[in-house]
Amino acid sequence: MDVSPVLSLSQVSKSFGAVRAVREVSLDLFPGEAHALAGENGAGKSTLVKILSGVHRPDSGRILLDGEPVEFGGPADAQHAGVAVIYQEPTLFPDLSVMENIFMGRQPRSRLGIDRRAMRASAAELFAGLGVRLDPDQPARGLSIADQQLVEIAKALSLRARVLVMDEPTAALSGKEVARLFGVARTLREQGCALLFISHRLEEMFELCQRVTTLRDGAFVASDLIADISADDLVRRMVGRDLEALFPKQETDTGEVALQVRRLTREGVFTDVSFEVRRGEIVALAGLVGAGRSEVARAVFGIDRWDAGSVEVDGRRLRPASPTAAMAAGLALVPEDRRQQGLVMDLSIERNIGLAGLASVRRGPLISRPAERERARDWAVRLRLKFGRLTDPVNVLSGGNQQKVVLAKWLARKPSVLIVDEPTRGIDVGTKAEVHRLLSELAAGGVAVLMISSELPEVLGMADRVLVMHEGRLVAEIGRAEATEESVMAAATGRSVA
Amino acid sequence: MTVTEAEAETRRSNGGRRLVDRVARVRELGIVVALGILFGVTGAVNPSFLTYASLRDILLNSAIVAMLAVGQTLVVITRNVDLSVSSVVGLSAFGGALILADNPGVPIPVVIAGCVLLGAACGAINGLLVGVAKVPALVATLGTLYAFRGIDYAWAGGRQVNAADMPESFLSLGTRSVLGIPLPALVALAVLLVVGWMLRNLRAGRELYAIGSSPEAAVLAGIRVRRRIVAAFVANGALAGLAGIMWAARFGTVDATVATGKELDVIAAVVVGGVAIFGGSGTVYGAALGALLLAGITSALAVLRVDALAQTAINGALLIAAIVLDRVLALRVAAALRRRRFHDAR
Amino acid sequence: MPADLARVARRWEGLILVLLVAVVLWASLGIDGFANVSNVSFLLLDTTEIALMALTMTLVIVAAEIDLSVASTLGLSCAVLGWLWNAGLPIEAIMPICLLVGAACGAFNGLLVTRLGLPSLAVTIGTFALFRGLAYVMLGDQAVADLPPAYTSLATASVGPIPLATLLVVVLAAVAGVVLHATGLGRSIFALGSNVDAAYFSGVRVKRIKLWLFVASGVMASLASLVYTFRYASARADNGVGLELAVVAAVLLGGVSIFGGRGTLPGVLMAVLLLGVVRNALILADVANEVLNFVTGLLLVASVLAPNLGAFWRRRTTPQVEGKSVS
Amino acid sequence: GTTKTDVAQQQSSAPAATAASSAAADPNAPLKQGLKIAFLPKQVNNPYFTIADNGGIEAAKEFGGEGKEVGPSDASASSQVSYINTLMQQKQDAIVISANDPNAVVPALKQARAAGIKVVSYDSDTAAEGRDVFVNQAGAEDLGRTEVQLLAEQIDHKGKIAVLSATPNATNQNTWIEFMKDELKKPEYKDMELVKVAYGNDDDQKSFTETQGLLRSYPDLAGIISPTTVGIAAAARYLSDSPSKGKVKLTGLGTPNQLRKFVKDGTIEAFELWNPADLGYLASYAAAALASGQITGTEGEKFKAGKLGEYTVGAKGEVLLGKPTVFNKENIDKFDF
Ligand SMILES: Nc1ncnc2c1ncn2[C@@H]1O[C@H](COP(=O)(O)OP(=O)(O)OP(=O)(O)O)[C@@H](O)[C@H]1O
Ligand SMILES: Nc1ncnc2c1ncn2[C@@H]1O[C@H](COP(=O)(O)OP(=O)(O)OP(=O)(O)O)[C@@H](O)[C@H]1O
Ligand SMILES: [Mg+2]
Ligand SMILES: [Mg+2]
């Protein structure tokens, strides 16, 4: 290539205590090129991103901006240098309005201070470009993960940066938003912006990027032109071995009804939702972002109060608004927002895994530490968790590994009805297959699984039945045989299904 | 996106904004309602409560706490707290009074400036402890609450400065009225308006909210968190210093115990005023209204001839009632908002 | 953020322990009248109320709440005791009633916090005034002093150098320590103090636990009021004014995070003792009261500052936003 | 427990460790040299006590003893107890205390007395079993009645009056107020009505707002009695600046330095107080007399108190300082405290 890179990393390394998160990795970002970063969970992608954005200072190696070595003393320096970052986990100010989140520190000003009208207009313009229906004055608190991610994207775009780094921006998005985002990204690329894109969805990398760099265990593996390699090659580079089929849902005989939801309504959120899930069955709940799927799951599990309707588990009605009652009945919910709802970030891995099942490691009134640790280790190994020690706080784990801890916490309870909300969000291909195998095994063992997912291939590959929600209502139920991308999307966007 | 779609979008967001605005206003409305009830009921029972002299006294009484509440709001918004204000007030009040008493010729503006600087220095100590050395604010300022008071005691050594020792021109600052409004209340009002404007219309002001709302995100957004936190503490300290010298002018009798325990009143005013104790939201106007409400309650109890022994209890009960009222209103609005969300979005 | 919380905790307690040992050594060698049985016994006795209230305050603060009304609850319970005693009830009947009053005060706080979702700081500033006020209403300016000598002497009695009241603290501390550090309830308290949402999603009965913590805090305050009343042989409405700050200071000095989710009970107990020893030693050394206040404040700040300064110097050389969990 | 006897044994140099009354007094015993006398006021840094204790320390110097002031900065009973214990460990010869709570300090004082330490209470008494002698600044009855008389003269025995006191449980003030109420029952006060007792908690600002509240709720108030130095100063401050200045009469207990300005500008006609320095002085001599065995606290015993002359121990171990001085425009400039 004859152009020179805007931003390069040269032989950077970064360790956290004993963990060598990034080892002598080099990377060149060229203007007008979208560069993909691939690797399993914990491979060091996010750490690399944080080095680029000045959050972490590399232990060794250099950062080059336009060929000149620079040192980023903090995120502010990187921003000044024209590097915009969308972090893996949304970093919003919950109390502030969406537009202030976007323009914090860069608010348009008039003579009388901040010019809110101009700010509102710019925010609306950004949202329009992304095709998002968000009110710029709305507070960020209460936004769904997807909406938060979209605000992050708008924020990064508003910087009009020379380098745009996106750490799994699509993990929480469904097809429609992803398409919009890619549209915007392509435009930026054509305008000469350099993109760094991270995703665990291989097809997205192939769709958007020209080049891909692969990391494994913090070390550089290869950098290829996308055109030159196949998906299988890429997976092999990431995982270091061949992978078997991605979606191994076994056919199982379905048993009696385990979860029965009748005419469930929570005013203003979802209306009249009825469905059932049988033992041994995986039912997917599909829909666009904001259709209300997570809200249904929350209500069923007793997090939110419902206004009308009923939920039965094994023929017994659940007390409303009581997660404890739901758990006692055999229900488990893997929530979509792992940082807020799934994990206590300051607590250790073992305590997090143990938290939902304290009763099972008790000796009399006391907790048996060996039993607790045994249980945690068992599940950590089964889910191939990448960790230093079980006593490390979960916040040092990579995003995907955090997700595994949430899964472990709930699977360890051996639930009879398992609700998983975006179970593989941010999980790498290898582990994703692992999670799918697990879900499938659980179903085979007689567990009723309700899976909420925004990833259509996952829905189609895993589900025995697909329920589709649109604007708070259940609009379609599609059997495994009839479920195709077209049929599901049609229902999800509100077009009637044949 | 077509033009009409965009228009629809804007209109929708306008509708949403109106709603949000209304909710935001309700935050302070709760206290205004409480204030209205208080003044209405008390005035009905004893009309002398609503006379000019009485209202003037209430304004005077709330001026100092209101100013402290404004300063405290700056700190609380950043998810911190300053318990040491009462000790700073004491230090500044005693220091100022002592200098005025011992040096008869010293120009009053110089003394006032000195007190503000003294307060700012105390604030800077707090700010450095919290912002730079990362000591949790509650711990740091609980420590300096003791420490500053200790300095105050050591300085005073049992001495008391009486009104007779200070120049008349200084004392009159505490009671003089301009256009019928007592001077301390005018100063507090000016401070309130300036700080209120800065918090809303300056980037630095918005950044304080951002820091309180999510400290981690603030770092990632490139906000100079340390500097802002120190600045908030310094500003609060300076206001406490000003409040201290106002205290000396108003009450005339000053010793080392001035304002002991006032920090709880200030925080109560801030909390009643709807400032979130965990940062990120609330306005100085609310905090000042909170201070006014607390002063109003105290005056009303005296005017209503409530038994002295029962006053503390009723004070506490009314405080709780005000918080509960505010909360119930907020919950109602939130519920209404949820019900409307889908209709609105369509 | 240091990788191992347990290690941090251990390091913290280590620090307090070293400080405690140092101060005790210095005082025994350098201050006349410190290291003798009657002084040690008095010192222990004098920390009883603070220690008792600090036990439950630790649990409450670990759960990310705070109870500023403890000293007022103590006052109200004293007032009830005095009032009922004046009314002629036997003391054996009055004591359980006092504990019930404490429980009711705690429940009032707890219900406002859990049912209405009000911040506990705000609620307990309110009840701080309310409970104290009720105490004045009940007992007014009276001091009830003709309490049965059997109880007043029991409150100051000791086994060897150890006052009976201290034994009570030890027993209750053991209970609280086991609850916090070895039971499911303790785990749940840490979890909900650190992240309420995640705890709620994990089936932790957040509201119920918080409610009971406030009740426990109230009961403990009234238990402390019994010790207080008998120890001073005087039941008054203004008993224990200002103790809440001493309790909170001890808990924070003991390494409990004011943001919840972090802290240990042994640390808090050592901090209570440290503050008591420092006070006692300095008074014996005829150090003026203002210096005493100053030292208390300094100790509080310095103890938190010391480990932070280490981190601060390390930060100079390594990354800026160490471990901010954004991943 | 074992503690009491331990301490008693350590105190072998001190006179007989049992309660003072059993030992016989020797009126002619000389004052011992080098007596260690500790003053424990309600609260240090309180100007009133600073003056009183300095008077006492002065006296100690005169008779060759060693005086010091220690105490809490908050006026609470429990913190005084810590100091009593400390003074006991320090083997002081006498403790001179003004009790925050007449009962709460008694167990600790008893222990101190058992260890041979003499206890004198001043300003605010403890329960009788806690001390040997109480040095009373003025007869409670005297004070209560004279204050009513002072005010009555100023308002021609007519109108509504109020009292602005310290805390609701201040022992002194409450006794005085009782006597005021009793005095008001007399026929010559039939036109006077005590409408309210307000409490300023000995806090300047609270007293200030309470005064304000009094005027607000009783617009036709004729006079205020404030039997506390903090209260009267705050009330004077408020009145001097309000339209009621000179119309609403104010009297009570205050120090001349605090109130000089208000006497001169007409806010206050007259108020009264004993000399706090004399109070401390007398208490110091009483302590020395006790520690030297001149007196034991029994009624009728006499001792010399330096420049103040001879005093006699009255009933219940009380020593009376004398009548308070009434301060007015004419005489106020003669006093400086
Ligand atoms: N602050 C930290 N302290 C200690 N270890 C850390 C920290 N941040 C990351 N790590 C470790 O560094 C390694 C790389 O993490 P990183 O977040 O970069 O992975 P990733 O490639 O982004 O994974 P994912 O796809 O799951 O997001 C992991 O083993 C992680 O546990
Ligand atoms: N706590 C909340 N307060 C206010 N609005 C909320 C809250 N949680 C979610 N919403 C909004 O409710 C709508 C439904 O959200 P929900 O999370 O149920 O959607 P979903 O179908 O699960 O989509 P996804 O999980 O893919 O984002 C969205 O518009 C979201 O912004
Ligand atoms: Mg990552
Ligand atoms: Mg969802």
Image (cartoon, rainbow, N blue to C red):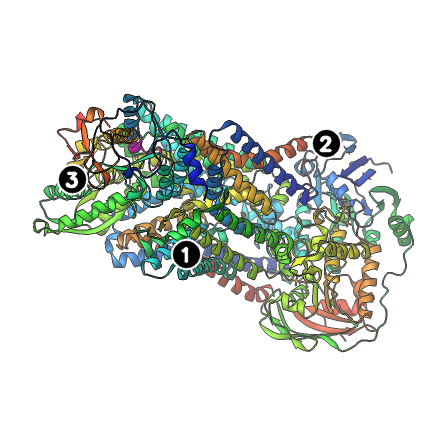
- Single out the mark in the foreground, 2 or 3: 3
Residue B321 location, quadrant:
bottom left
Amino acid type assigned to the residue bearing label 2 in the image: Glu
Amino acid type assigned to the residue bearing label 3 in the image: Gly
Chain to which the residue tagged by mark 1 belongs: B
Asked whether, in this view, residue A269 is left or right of residue A255, the answer is left
Indicate the position of residue C198 as horizontal and vertical percent values. Answer: 64, 57
Amino acid type assigned to the residue bearing label 1 in the image: Ala
Q: Is residue A331 magenta?
A: no
Q: Which residue is identified by label 2?
A: A71
- Mark 3 is surrounded, within 10 Å at the Cα level, by few (under 14), some (14 to 19) or many (20 or more) other residues, namely some
Dots 2 and 3 on the same chain: no
* Front one among A14 and D186: D186
- Mark 2 is surrounded, within 10 Å at the Cα level, by few (under 14), some (14 to 19) or many (20 or more) other residues, namely some
* Front one among D34 and B288: D34
Question: Which mark, by number, is residue D246?
Answer: 3
Residue A264 location, quadrant:
bottom right
**Which residues are drawn in magenta?**
D38-49
Q: Is residue D260 visible?
A: yes
Pointer 2 residue Cβ closer than 8 Å to ligand 1:
no
Q: Quadrant of the N terminus of chain C?
A: top right
* Front one among D296 and A440: D296
Dots 2 and 1 on the same chain: no
Question: Which mark, by number, is residue B322?
Answer: 1
Q: Considering the numbered disc 2 on the image, is that residue within a helix, a strand or a loop?
A: loop
- Mark 1 is surrounded, within 10 Å at the Cα level, by few (under 14), some (14 to 19) or many (20 or more) other residues, namely many
Q: CA distance from mark 2 to mark 1?
A: 53 Å
Q: Considering the numbered disc 1 on the image, is that residue within a helix, a strand or a loop?
A: helix
Indicate the position of residue D29 as horizontal and vertical percent values. Answer: 25, 26
Chain to which the residue tagged by mark 2 belongs: A
